[in-house]
Image (cartoon, helix red, strand yellow):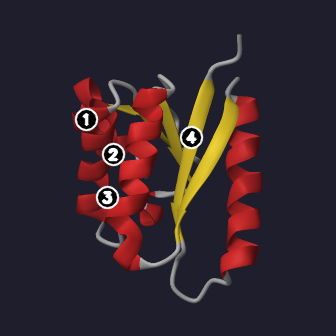
Amino acid sequence: MIPTIYGYARLLPGADANAELSRVRRKLNGFAGRRGFRLMDVMMLERPGDRLEVWAELLWSCRLFRVSDIVVPSLAHLHEDEPLARFMCEDVARWISGRVWIVGTRGPVVAARAEELGVMAR
């Protein structure tokens, strides 16, 4: 059985919503396939006011379907403030008892190895 992974991205300033969602889906689907996952869905934050709703849907979906992996295109998709984005990786990994993958890094972020995040995000 192929493990599943959820994707998360936020619409970055200046990006066209439809084009960005298509690009992100392709990028995350390619990452999932190369790592042996099936991309279940991509939760896309399009408006900052929807942040809590989108995060709640993502985290509860992980728990409901027992998915313990999330992938994001980059730290910038988690938050514009890099230290806060790094903290979010660790916190989310702990909450889902799993891993947060950042495309282009050498490995996932897991709560137990959060001290390594600075190295992995470069």
Q: Are marks 3 and 2 in contact (CB under 8 Å)?
A: yes
Please name the residue that numbered disc 3 is placed on: 85
Closer to the camera, 37 or 116? 37
Whichever of labels 1 and 4 marks the residue nearer the N terminus, that label is 4
Disc 1 target residue: 114
Q: What residue lies at 38% left-to-right and 61% top-to-bottom? A: 53
Whichever of labels 2 and 1 marks the residue nearer the N terminus, that label is 2
Q: Which residue is mark 4?
A: 6
User: Answer yes or no: do the residues labelled 1 and 4 have beta carbons within 8 Å?
Assistant: no
Report the amino acid beneath label 1.
Answer: Ala
Q: Residues within 10 Å of mark 4 (few under 14, many from 20)?
A: many
Q: Is residue 21 above or below residue 48?
A: above
Mark positioned earlier in the residue sequence (1 or 3): 3
Residue 64 figure quarter: top left
- For the residue marked with disc 2, what is the amino acid? Cys
Badge 1, how many Cα within 10 Å: few under 14, some, many 20+? some
- Work out how far the residue at label 1 is from the one at label 4, CA to CA, in angstroms: 20 Å
Q: Which mark is residue 89?
A: 2
Q: Is residue 8 left or right of residue 24?
A: left
Between residue 107 and residue 36, name the one nearer to us. Answer: 36
